[in-house]
Amino acid sequence: MKFKPSIKPYSGAAGGWGSLEATTRYVLDSKKTLSNLRNLLRVNKGRGFDCPGCAWGDDNHSTFSFCENGAKAVSWEATRKAVEPEFFHQHSVTTLRQQSDYFLEYQGRLTQPMRYNSVVDRYQPITWNEAFSLIASHINGLADPNQLELYTSGRASNESSYLYQLFGRMLGTNNFPDCSNMCHEASGVGLKQSIGVGKGTIHLEDFEKADAIFVFGQNPGTNHPRMLHSLRHAADRGAKIVSFNTLRERGLERFADPQNPIDMLTSKSGQISCAYFQPNLGGDMAAVRGMVKALLENHRLNIASDKPGLFDDAFIAEHCAGLDEYLAAVDATRWEHIVRQSGLSEIQLRQAAAIYQHAGRVICTWAMGITQHKHSVATVREITNLQLLFGQLGKPGAGLCPVRGHSNVQGNRTMGIDEKPPAKFLDNLAKHFNFTPPRVPGHNTVEALEAMLRGEVKVLLALGGNLAAAAPDTERTARALRCCDLTVHISTKLNRSHLITGKEALILPTLGRTELDMQASGSQFITVEDSFSMVHASEGVGKPISDEQRSETAIVAGIAHAVLGDEHLDWLELADDYHLIRDHIEATIPGFTHFNQRCDIPGGFYLGNAAAELRFSTPNGKANFSHAALPEFVIPHMNGQQAPFTLQTLRSHDQYNTTIYGLDDRYRGVYGQRDVLFIHPDDMSALGLNEGELVEIETLWNDGVIRKVSGFKLVSYAIPRGNLAAYYPETNPLVPLSSFGDETHTPTSKSIPVVIRRCEQTDSQRIA
């Protein structure tokens, strides 16, 4: 398909006719129009299938419960287009490597197991038994089980994830790098330290009861559009929505509900944010600290005037620890530091504080704009500090809401996809399955790539995902994958990772969420967990495009059977009947009592959250204030000098994670292209550059490695001076593997120190 690149500022609201038109186009383009329309009516409904897109909760009151990007995900998966063996016969891996990520995935569904033949540089068909035997020969030949990495995508079901981690631990490793390591790790780490639970504390229904909703580092219009319905309904009933985002994003400004006839038949659209602040990249912690400083001042003024203080003293006294140390840290933080680091004025932060002060029930919600910085854990804890001061936990309409990405990334962690598993979880596995699981922490994603580069890893198994494109430092990531003896990818579609092979490589084609999963005991359903700790059953309905495709659960069981045999477990029996897997989950993971029976509950069932019940599983049994100081600099200084620009990577609207649905970014006015760089117009002028000129972007880092990409078109945008934005994975080559968050190893993809220069031609560094 050919596209005419253009930049046309978008004047409409998010959603509305633009969303409806895009949804229709993608359904038609799938070549399965009627079946996909039927599929969409079953998304997130009853015993239909859970959307393979984001992890936002299901609204069971709507006529239909999918968004534009959910429709793209469903249509993209349920396409008639297929990548047959003949395709690989016609295209060498070297040739395919030069194609774009959009081209690769647009070819359609993978239909048959394929093995890479390095002699002819092509993938060739292989039987399932041959594939399993090859994997078993490599794994059983390892000198140490820690020479194996078990990577996981957030779309894997609870059942396949549970078997996957069980297989790895029976083998003897905790090497479970996953997509959460690269995105949301700071939320789990920070919340566990503060309140003892690494998940959000609210229900979806709390958005209907909040007086104010503070949105940090989040673009729901593109990344989880169903959230816009919740925000719009809250705004319509008078709740104050306050957004902190470096870029102006249409979905946080205005939204026209495609399910509302008045919105669709008139020019009416609802305002979302009553106040919109644009902090510097990495400046959110300083912004929240400024709000608290203003609120603390008002609190003390009230007390001095014999009025009630602002803070919830009873809540703090009963449930919290560390208040004095925190308030001392707030007092020690100068307004000058707050303003410089946040990029917001004292007046703006006092305005935000006033809205918070006058709201009885407040939700704070955030996403990757918060979690992909060096000081992300401290920022998550600072947001939590604010909520603790006012007792905004454990009551309707209030709490903490980290919004995660893929539709089961939270469930993966619940199932044990964790390189640092809790001791109690390992104890439960040991007792129930009668084996000794490993206790030494395994590798997260960055550590896994570094171990590959050192030659310490021989085999990579990837349960979904696209590691080569998703990971930072593209050239080094590619080199790491090539160091492996065997790379195995369980995938629905062709992607970049299949082309960055180990010495040997396999592609194993799997069923998608939308498709009928027929096993020996009959049709199977799987389960997933959303961002609100709700567990849903999901049962596909579509006929698979190929008889050779297998479910993720069956593939994992087949690998485990080939490698371990049936000494501890009859893996193939579990693949025949997923009810048996859920029985094991019930026996080893708290919250899953009567798991199989509760899968029939309409809308799913709630796992529970101790912190939401004001029970804090921290060492001291309290919710703990963090007294971390603001970082001196949010971006590292190189040779004592601050970088002239800070770059963040982000998604386009026609994208979900590394899946590129199209080349448009409608809400930002970009069409038919992806190599663009968003910049403040005054920064462009100061550099003597013009709109549409091509530039190269180079990272300033301290390891002697040159990291740059070229041929990026300048686009004027509403973004603070000194801040830049561009799409990933195109700009992943700029993110150093050694630049990651404190306590998380999450790549700092939202705070890359860079310089930009005029260039005359593009380069191909980003195609590893």
Image (cartoon, rainbow, N blue to C red):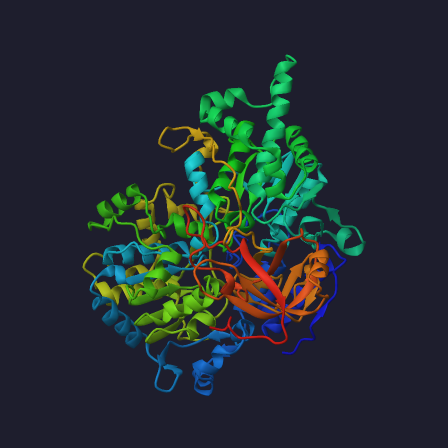
At x 54% / y 56%, what residue is drawn? Answer: 753
Find residue 708 and report its horizontal and vertical position in percent.
53, 67
Is residue 680 found left or right of 761 in the rendered image? right
Nearest to the observer: residue 314 or residue 493: 314
Find residue 354 and report its horizontal and vertical position in percent.
67, 31
On screen, residue 314 above or below 573: above
Q: How many numbered dots are placed on residues in this image?
A: 0
Q: Quadrant of residue 264?
A: bottom right
On screen, residue 170 above or below 312: below
Residue 391 visible in rendering: no
Is residue 626 found left or right of 299 in the rendered image? left
At x 33% / y 64%, what residue is drawn? Answer: 452
Find residue 344 and report its horizontal and vertical position in percent.
66, 41
Find residue 137 and report its horizontal and vertical position in percent.
23, 71
Is residue 572 found left or right of 374 in the rendered image? left
Residue 652 visible in rendering: yes
Nearest to the observer: residue 477 or residue 76: 477
Question: Which image quarter is the N terminus in?
Answer: bottom right
On screen, residue 30 above or below 590: below
At x 51% / y 70%, what residue is drawn? Answer: 766
On screen, residue 254 above or below 68: above
Residue sitting at the far top: 306
Nearest to the observer: residue 702 or residue 238: 702
Residue sitting at the far right: 266
